[in-house]
Amino acid sequence: MIKYLIIFEGELIMHIANWHEYRNKIKLNNTHWINGSFVESKSGQTIDKQTPIDGKHLVSFARGTKADVDTAVAAAKKAFCSGIWSDLAPAKRKAILLNFAKLIEDNCNELAMLETLDMGKPISESINVDVSATVNCFRYYAEAIDKVYGEVAPTGPDSFAYIIKQPVGVVGAIVPWNYPLIMTAWKLAPALAAGNAVVLKPSERSPLSALKLAELAKEALIPDGVLNVVLGYGHEAGEALALHPDVNVLGFTGSTLTGKKMLAYSSQSNLKRIYNELGGKSAVLVFNDYNNLERAAATLAGSMFYNQGQSCNAPSRILVQEDIADEMVKLLAKRAPLHQPADPLLPTTGMGAMVDQKHMERVLAYIETGNKNGAECIVGGKRALSDSGGYYIEPTIFDKVTPNMTIAQEEIFGPVLSVIRFKTEAEALQIANASDYGLQAGIWSNDVSRIHRLARKLQAGTVHVNQFDGDNITVPFGGVKQSGNGRDKSLHALDKYTELKTVWLQINTDN
Ligand code: NAD
């Protein structure tokens, strides 16, 4: 899915012949980045992390607490108020951010390696999707920012009112582990381009690439204090950031459960604006009038198993019209072997490891629940490659899932696809919308009226028609209902990190 985010000059080149050897040459930073330097936690405490590739210890990194967050926010506030970044002409911020994007591109191998070691995704995807999309995202907002105009209000001849967009101040960004670089870029790029200072809290499951980004930001001449990274657990560092009275806007991506807490933190502190990008359980409706089921199955299996199924918008509920369901299930099953997990450090690997043991066990528990509830597991369903010590799960397909089953309602966030059969369009729509989530949806049909009818009625931020991979930095990404309220990407994301200000002038009409 997210691979098509890239409108890029081409795939980044993988210069490394042996990624296992390269792994040992990589330096792993492990402390916070505050005011332009690496700093230890004030408490001295650390968090141990394994790599999901083989389950071995990877790094011990700083465990941030409120004290570290306070220091980072103070640095960000000071940098913001100094005007060293916020008062720069947009064209100057643009030049620096383009420089930053170039440095990210130049360091693509190292960033990709950090991403793969941290969360287990295949190295070829880390480099050609995650790093590429990150470069592209910074370039996009850098290029956009000196093309944003204010407005003049049509007030009348005796006054002049103009409206400008200003940076909001200190932006807190809290991001998950499934696309650590991309999710970070989706927050940082518009926030920095707009002139804000940022404190980023990456996931405790994937802290590494954010620290490399911070180092590169300094090299790109982003002033000290404008970008800060505090590591640590959500309930410690994350909570302190979300509660901080000097954070003006919080961009959050993560689970719905945590997103709800963000709203509480805001109301308990300073009413900071919260933009929530949360979980999903995307429904895809496949109708018997669609003429290429083979293509539908290949696309949907690819999207579902991409990133080991750990994508917020994964098409995890496939609703198929009854008379084509057997055929569609057969075609989906045929695709599954193409997505078998393998060593993420081999360039040929297309499916890697689950982020950690706890998450793997959570996904396996959902598979067990599916079996117990009477769904029919037709492919996969087990842990794979356990001899490696890593955390791998076979691509798994359940047939004969009913809409109220747990596996049809809850976000599994793993390579587990549910097929639900339906008879009529009305029934399909009802099932699709009977979800707390509303991130994305899909329609496969050749009936143009049906497509438009359903596209309007499906409760989702994005509706895909006869594809599921369409994505691009130019279009907004976000959901409705309990999938959140924010929109990352596109020019709309700049609105999240800017304030509208009106300036009134009286004009003396007598001369
Ligand atoms: P999570 O909610 O557990 O954690 C996300 C981030 O929030 C992490 O940095 C974590 O440390 C922090 N956090 C956790 N508890 C916190 C608290 N009490 N206070 C402050 N911060 C806290 O989610 P996750 O497991 O890291 O990520 C997976 C979830 O993210 C899935 O639900 C997925 O659908 C969602 N997601 C959504 C999008 C989107 O754009 N809508 C994109 C990617 C992932």
Image (cartoon, rainbow, N blue to C red):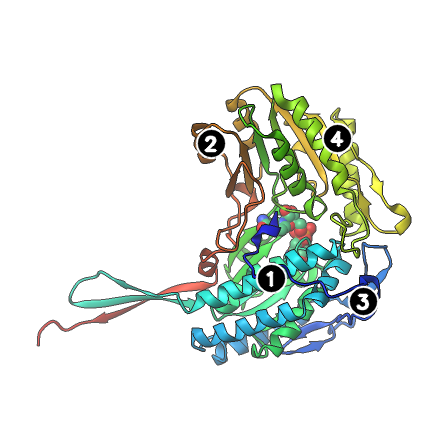
Q: Amino acid at mark 2?
A: Ile
Mark-to-mark CA distance, 1 and 2: 33 Å
Describe the element under mark 2 as helix, strand or loop.
helix
Mark-to-mark CA distance, 3 and 1: 22 Å
Q: Amino acid at mark 4?
A: Gly
| N-terminal-most mark, 2 or 4 | 4
Q: Amino acid at mark 1?
A: Thr
Q: Badges 4 and 3: C-beta atoms under 8 Å apart? A: no
**Mark 2 residue crowding within 10 angstroms, few (<14) / some (14–19) / many (20+):** some
Name the one closer to the observer, 39 or 338: 338
Describe the element under mark 1 as helix, strand or loop.
helix
Residue annotated with mark 3: 22
* Quadrant assignment for the C terminus: bottom left
Give the number of the disc on residue 370. Answer: 4
Q: Badges 2 and 4: C-beta atoms under 8 Å apart? A: no
Q: Residue at x 65, y 47 (%)?
A: 311
| N-terminal-most mark, 1 or 2 | 1
